Image (spheres, helix red, strand yellow):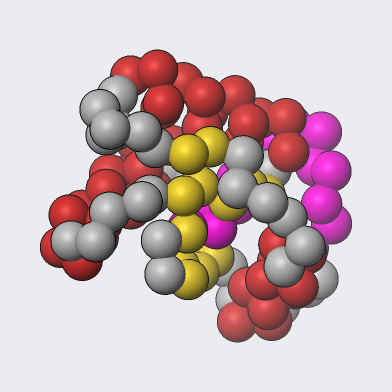
């Protein structure tokens, strides 16, 4: 499943008021952090993750790894924050049609 531009815009609107639920620490992207991201995606479907690093290349690689490992959709990145969406079995968020 890929997200259309209309669906991404809808999700960006929903994510605007959210605070990051996962914050990477000094140890970077560990198994514990990945488990926390997975758990929050299962519960909320739409989450923000904050990666506080000043190295753009490192940040980009971490974002790519999170998306790849969680099978989530990257809705957008803003500075140190990535917005992720992955539909759960409950389908809490109803996406607009394409």
Queried whether the magenta region covers residue 69, the answer comes back as no
Where residue 43 appears, as percent x and y from the top left, is: 72, 30
Task: Judge left or right: residue 10 versus residue 67.
Answer: right
Residue 73, visible in the rendered structure: no
Q: Residue at x 82, y 52 (%)?
A: 93
Q: Nearer the viewer, residue 40 or 21?
A: 21
Name the chief secondary structure element in magenta: loop
Task: Judge left or right: residue 59 versus residue 48.
Answer: left
Which quadrant: the N terminus?
bottom right
Magenta region, residue range: 82-95
Q: Residue at x 27, y 54 (%)?
A: 53
Where residue 28 appears, as percent x and y from the top left, is: 27, 34
Where residue 73 appears, as percent x and y from the top left, is: 50, 55
Task: Judge left or right: residue 17 versus residue 40.
Answer: right
Queried whether the magenta region covers residue 90, the answer comes back as yes
Residue 9 sits in which quadrant?
A: bottom right
Residue 7 sits in which quadrant?
A: bottom right
Q: Nearer the viewer, residue 97 or 50?
A: 50
Residue 53 drawn above or below residue 68:
below
Which quadrant: the C terminus?
bottom right
Q: Residue at x 67, y 71 (%)?
A: 12
Where residue 44 appears, as percent x and y from the top left, is: 73, 38
Q: Nearer the viewer, residue 42 or 60?
A: 60
Q: Residue at x 76, y 73 (%)?
A: 13
Residue 86, visible in the rendered structure: yes
Q: Nearer the viewer, residue 26 or 89?
A: 26
Residue 83 drawn above or below residue 20:
below
Across the whole image, how many numbered discs are drawn on residues? 0
């Amino acid at each position: 499943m890929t997200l259309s531009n209309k669906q991404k815009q809808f999700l960006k609107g929903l994510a605007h008021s959210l605070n990051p639920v996962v914050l990477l620490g000094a140890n970077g992207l560990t198994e514990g952090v990945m488990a926390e991201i997975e758990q929050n995606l299962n519960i909320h479907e739409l989450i923000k993750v904050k990666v506080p690093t000043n190295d753009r290349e490192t940040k980009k690689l971490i974002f790519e790894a999170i998306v790849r490992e969680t099978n989530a959709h990257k809705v957008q990145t803003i500075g140190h924050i990535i917005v992720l969406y992955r539909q759960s079995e409950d389908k809490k968020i109803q996406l607009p049609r394409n």
